[in-house]
Amino acid sequence: MAHPQRKTFGQRPQLSAAPAPMAAPGRKSTLVLSLATLGALGLAGAVYATLPASAPAPAQSCPRDQNGAENCARTGRSSFFFFWRGGATPAPAPQAAQALRPTPPGLRPAMAPAAPVKFGGFGASATGHGAAAGA
Amino acid sequence: MRRIALPPRPDFEKRAADIGFEFAFLDGEPYWNESAAYVFSLAEIENDLEAPTQELAALAREVAGRVVTDERALRRLGVPEHAWPLILESWRREDVSLYGRFDFSYDGNGPAKLLEYNADTPTSLFESAVVQWFWLQDLVARRQMPAHADQFNSLHEKLIARWPAVARGAYVHLACMTGSIEDRGTVAYLADCATQAGLDTRIVDMQDIGHVDGRFVDRDLVALDCAFKLYPWEWMFADEFGKSPALRATRWAEPPWKALLSNKGLLALMWETAPGHPNLLPAYFETDPRIGELGDRFARKPLLSREGANVSLFDGASILARTTGDYGAEGYVRQGLHLLPDFDGWRPVMGSWLVGAEAAGLGVREDRSLVTSNRSRFTPHVILD
């Protein structure tokens, strides 16, 4: 679809992402289940699994650009080593979620303030507008 | 572009549970809708959605760079004066943006028209990145879609790739109003992406952010070095902690300068910068005498509002739609009227995602109403032609 007037605003942007490696049929991919999300969602355990060799490869051949080169940046799912499982149990209250994942020792030490900590300084505006803040 | 009817997967509930999709229904109403899908050609995606997304992202950034030191523009946007130094510092420091979403009106004929830019706290991310992708995978596996069926969707990979630039090795707190299941789901997904990027994360409620010794901390008194917040900057500025110097001690995502772009005054500033751009609609601040150029067909939108609240669509003497809400105190913009297209009585809006400055995917929401709201249904899409 031609939009000649767009030439006024510059050339079509180049897809800057490098093409992702294509998934070869039968390739074994490592699936990593993120521990933090599981903890936050109150789910039990973690999974480290290997995709069976028979798992379906992403069903696309990458489109080709004007020069005939394959460009997988847009479709891009060949690098989709993603495994996210949840919903089996309700998400816990925030405090419980925190308790599931204490700060790793030494990674980020807790402060030891002399003054009392004040909480609740954020959130009032959400309460006034119906709580959800996403758009 | 077309809308096709499809049989929903009989095992949808299990498939949703498998991937942790907890809000297919919101308040008892279906939110995820797979009884239909929007079909695009590759050319429509690349030329009409992806390219304009990249282009408008650059334009928006150009506007931000101009406005950040323009006192008059900051006032027109209703940005509180106490926030100006924080915004300017974050711009000059080149604080990194994680993501954003342009909402376009598009029907496959003619250029997509920008309706708004959700630059600060966009949701529908998990649905776009993951739920609709697994939907497509399932349909291809079940031969309900051809093997070459594709989707404009590289959100997941790009989010993982982007996180290290945002966090720069810091521990990442992700804050939201955890009482909202949709917000909590969005943040949990982003935490997952960050973890897969090798970062350590913790989810906190906005109200569990504490303040002490010039720092923000969580309930365990761990300082917030890098914090993602699904909570708009204008609310942060208005809240009790909104003037605290501690705001400077945390690296925020989205960064403070994005507050300039999540404001619907951006629509007027973009039009001012690139008048006649094919992907923009004419738009003016309501206080601008040039609003007369719009005639009597325009949309009236608050500078700061969420989920389609307080929007009115005027067509001559008729009011085509009017939504309620409690926004608008900061002022309004008027934008040339461009109605959402009609597909079988459904009005889709194209949510075109950015990760950093890169176009990264599409999420379509549809409604019977002319104004998209947080109850509009997410309907998956596919590239077939």
Image (cartoon, coloured by chain):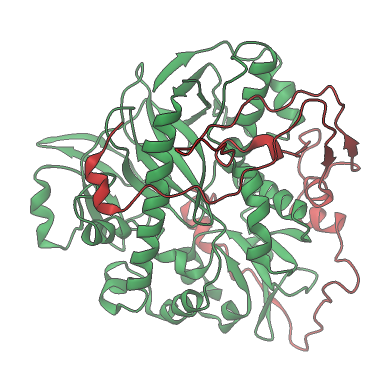
**Could you tell me residue B278's position as x and y percent?**
25, 44
> Residue B228 or A116: which is nearer the viewer?
B228
Q: Nearer the viewer, residue B9 or B22?
A: B9
Residue B373 visible? The answer is no
Q: Residue at x 55, y 41 (%)?
A: B124
Q: Position of residue B72 (x, y in %)?
A: 25, 76
Quadrant in which the N terminus of chain B is drawn:
top left
Residue at (55% x, 39% y) in the render = A74
As drawn, the residue found furthest toward the front would be: A67
- Name the residue nearer the viewer: B265 or A41: B265
Q: Is residue B253 above or below residue B345?
A: below
Vertical side of A38 occupied by B243: above or below:
below
How far from the left and from the top, in percent, is residue B183?
Answer: 60, 47
* Left or right of A16, for residue B303: left
Instruction: Residue at 89% x, 43% y: name it.
Output: A46
Q: Residue furthest bottom?
A: A114
Q: Nearer the viewer, residue B32 or B364?
A: B364
- Tell whether A133 sits left or right of B195: left
Q: How many marks?
A: 0
Chain coloured red: A
Q: Residue at x 53, y 78 (%)?
A: B93
User: Where residue B56 sits in the image (x, y, percent)?
Assistant: 37, 52
The chain whose colour is green is B
B198 lies left or right of B247: right
